Amino acid sequence: MKKTVLYDDGNIQWVVFGRDSSKPDSIIDTNEYLVQCQDETILIDPGGVEIFPNVLTAVSEHVELNTIKAFLCSHQDPDIMSSLPLWMALTPDAKIYLSWLWEGFVSHFGNEFSSNFVQIPDEGLQLTLGQSSFQLVPAHHLHSAGNFHLFDPCSGILFTGDVGAALLPVDHGMFVEDFEAHTQFMEKFHLRWMPSNSAKDIWLNRVRKLGVKMICPQHGAIFKGENVEKFFDWFDDLELGKLKRAS
Amino acid sequence: MCSRKDNVNLLYTRCTELREQVLRIDVAVEKIKDISINASILASQTGSQMRVFSELASQIEKTSRKMKSELSDLLGNIGESTKFALSAVVVTKRVDKLCLAISGVDRKANRVIIGEAIRKNQEVIQAAVSRVSRIARSFDRILRRFEDLLNRLFLALTSIRVEADLFSDHSGEQNISPLADSLEELLALITKEYESFRGFTWVFKSTAQSATARGA
């Protein structure tokens, strides 16, 4: 698995793991993000059960497992968090942040760790890790009915789950280089998965005010610099919630 | 360490096969119970002339009732065992993933944490496999009941043939021949089920032992 350090100021470090060349083609590629603050770590969207050995190996090279204090599950999909029972076997005291909406559903993966859940209310939450504070930003219906992104005010990194996701070849770089060329990998995904223009407008209105410097989706490539605004504009122009009739 | 997967999967398969076997035996025993009731009625119509057969038919009915009850208990236990076997299959998959990961982990502290998680999960598998293996304890009792039933069926068949011959002028005699044929068919069926079940118990015990030994 490819590891890229996205940000490191000596206090907070962001690392992304992705582009798993050893996974079967039938499994969609995912990005797993690790944020370390002093001696505490959060794993964001820890991934599916099939790629767990690779993610665990990659994470283990970077941090001591006993520093993992929390997991964020942006939503309930299997590629996001079906590995949770395995992670909880290693970190039984870690908290699991997820939308209140999904707790009863996610418990089907393993009820033994239901006491570790921290239900995120619809309006979001401040999450503290080490000495640092992060915002859990509501992103409901993008695409899941109970969906959260994470914003780090220190680094300006916004983790966006499936928003900004692209289906790319495994040898593609971790960052978007040519935005216009990149849209071909995102457009169909967003048109199919994102159901609501009004949800998109609410989200854009919220995140444009945050001072985002980097957009980190769960699939595909990361947006930084001018590509952040370009993405917001592109997404703003995208007409969601319309199904084309099959001809 | 992770090679027990096949054995645990096989144990789950054996549980489902065992259920199929027992359901088949249950159907055969139900037929025996029905025919023994008919035989008792028929024997009573012949007065005191077919005493031996009448007595045997009554014993067969009692034995088949007891066996039905034991099979019902066994089916309940098989249901429980299947759940335990399935949980062992699920946890074995977890252990496999952890084993895959530990081979690539260099940090000693992380290897210790993963190793401990593997050990705990293996204990869960071990407990589940032991629980499944316990079901084999009831096999001998079922086999003995089977043998008892087979003996009585054989004796009843012999008796009906002899007594029917002795009292061939009796008015009920015309009904005895089809009954004897039915008993003969059932004896063949139940003998086949007995042999199949006896062979399967060995296979089941062997699978359970392998699954237990692998996890030790």
Image (tube, coloured by chain):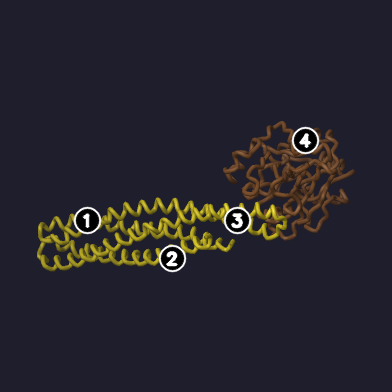
Q: CA distance from mark 2 to mark 4?
A: 60 Å
Which chain hosts label 2? B
In the image, taking residue B74 as reference, residue B38 lies left or right, namely left
Does B169 appear above or below A91? below
Which chain hosts label 4? A
Residue at 73 percent of width and 52 percent of height:
A59
Q: CA distance from mark 2 to mark 3?
A: 26 Å
Q: What secondary structure is found at the residue carrying circle 1? A: helix
Q: Which mark is residue B7?
A: none
Residue, disc 3: B95
Q: Colour of chain A?
A: brown
- N-terminal-most mark, 1 or 2: 1
Residue, disc 4: A133
Say whether residue B6 is visible: yes
Q: Nearer the viewer, mark 4 or mark 1?
A: 4
Q: Residue A86, how many percent across, how many down?
A: 63, 50
